[in-house]
DNA sequence: CTTATGCTTGACCATGTGGTCAAGATCAGC
DNA sequence: GCTGATCTTGACCACATGGTCAAGCATAAG
């Protein structure tokens, strides 16, 4: 039942279309996270989205096009998080905010993070171009910023590149490996309090590790 | 051509068998790492091992039994690495050795690490029992050791559990995400020198982060 | 030699799955 | 209510793939 169709020959999406595409994307993200690209079946995605399989192919012609959209989505979420790094020029605040934001994303978008991890793990067959363009230039920019901080004597001399990798791995670990973390937590997901403590620990160890004095001491 | 058969009704493995099982395991590890469990095909594994597909099923009846062996293998490699933590009672040396060893494993067994990551990512369908038994008890033991060090004032008070997660993620990242790391390194794998620097950075930031003074300062 | 055992392999099958199709439903605008 | 566009769906197909089978090889031992 196409409502609100602003179409005719133009193409602003109908409400039905928006709703279905959204439901499919959400279902796809969780199924891809659970089973990987090849392990996921379009039938399962359709079922989880509450529509028959041919309807899914009506909106996303191929499994790969759907997968690509899912990966692009999580990449965009991360790009926005990256802003939390750029918004200020103080190493303590920038690092704290960046790490915190990435931890929050791991908490709120575990499936997206897993899909991303899976994609990289298997050699980034679909988003190689993003790595070579957007990610590469963002990384180089942030390295320059950190190097400046080091030259200003505001933090210890560390290789900024490996610092960034460390931040990425520590934070995403809480999404990608959450099953292991849960298992080691008596098979119960981390509570909000536990997660807050984990976040605080990551921030604390890294900031101390790079010699940034924290004005607001460890909670 | 069965040689050295010490069999008859006994069952010490023939040389052919040993050789083939080894080749299959190695091929399987790389294919599973590239494509995940579902994405890997027994045909591809057989081809990479240089044997026809039915021969693979002669040694490993099902794809899942083969996969399980691959996962068990990498888990055992890690368990051995875990010893580097236990062999001494000095936080500086124990942490340095443990981190270094884990980094070395990421360098020497990237495929195994990827298979493990993939397994956890998808909810550990095959090795859940290892997580609940061996890994859980090892972790608890190491937490106790770290807590002791903290009480002795030999390192800052951090939550040992999240410190361990941090070490795991930072080190395994260099295997699991090596494609991303290579891409950000002008699409060239890290040289031995670069990897050594990365290792040094991880050790350096974490030891400083937990307030362990390094007797042998950053190289 | 013969025989038993271990190993190899081309041909084959059953199943699951990505994707198609064509007929039908629903709705906006006239 | 008619028309054209958008959306829905049961039935279907082509193909990949895990796994089997039975016949054939190689080797060690008698």
Image (spheres, coloured by chain):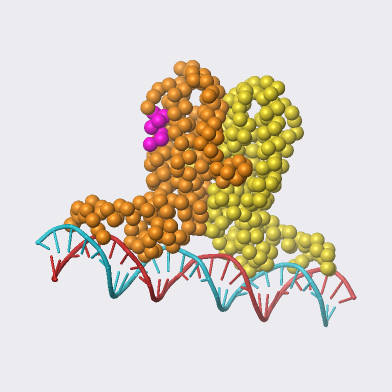
Chain colours: A orange, B yellow, C cyan, D red
Q: Position of residue B133 (x, y in %)?
A: 69, 46
Our reading of the magenta stretch's main secondary structure is helix
Taking the spot 73% from the left edge, 62% from the top edge, the residue there is: B17
- Residue drawn at (25%, 58%) of the image: A2
Q: Is residue B100 above or below residue B118?
A: above
Along the line of sight, the residue nearer the viewer: B27 or A156: A156
Can residue B182 be seen here? The reply is no
Residue B159 lies in what quarter of the image?
top right
Snapshot quadrant of residue A75:
top left
Residue B12 visible? The answer is: yes
Instruction: Please give left or right for residue B170 compared with residue D9 in the image.
Output: right
Residue C5 at what x, y percent from top left? 79, 71
The answer to which of B28 and B124 lies nearer the viewer is B124
Q: Depth check: A100 or B30 in front?
A: A100
* Up/down of B92 relative to A26, above or below: above
Q: List x then y, in percent, for residue A168.
A: 50, 36
The range drawn in magenta is: A80-86
Residue at 67% across, 43% down: B135
Q: Quadrant of the C terminus of chain B?
A: top right
Residue at point 38% right, 41% down?
A76
């Amino acid at each position: 039942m196409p409502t609100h169709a602003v179409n005719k020959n133009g193409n602003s999406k109908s409400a039905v279309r928006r709703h279905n595409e959204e439901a499919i994307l959400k279902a796809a993200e969780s199924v891809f996270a659970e089973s990987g690209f090849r392990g996921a079946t379009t039938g399962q995605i359709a079922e989880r989205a509450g529509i028959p399989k041919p309807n899914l192919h009506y909106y996303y012609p191929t499994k790969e096009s759907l997968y690509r959209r899912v990966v692009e989505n999580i990449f965009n979420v991360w790009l926005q998080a990256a802003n939390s790094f750029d918004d200020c020029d103080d190493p303590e605040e920038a690092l704290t905010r960046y790490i915190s934001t990435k931890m929050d994303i791991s908490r709120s978008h575990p499936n997206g993070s897993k899909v991303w991890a899976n994609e990289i793990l298997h050699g980034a067959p679909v988003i190689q171009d993003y790595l070579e363009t957007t990610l590469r230039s963002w990384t180089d920019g942030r390295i320059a910023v950190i190097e400046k901080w080091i030259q200003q004597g505001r933090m210890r001399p560390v290789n900024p590149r490996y610092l960034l990798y460390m931040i990425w791995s520590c934070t995403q670990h809480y999404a990608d490996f959450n099953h292991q973390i849960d298992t080691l937590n008596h098979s119960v997901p981390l509570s909000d309090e536990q997660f807050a403590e984990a976040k605080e620990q990551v921030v604390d160890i890294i900031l101390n590790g790079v010699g940034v004095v924290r004005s607001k001491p460890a909670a």
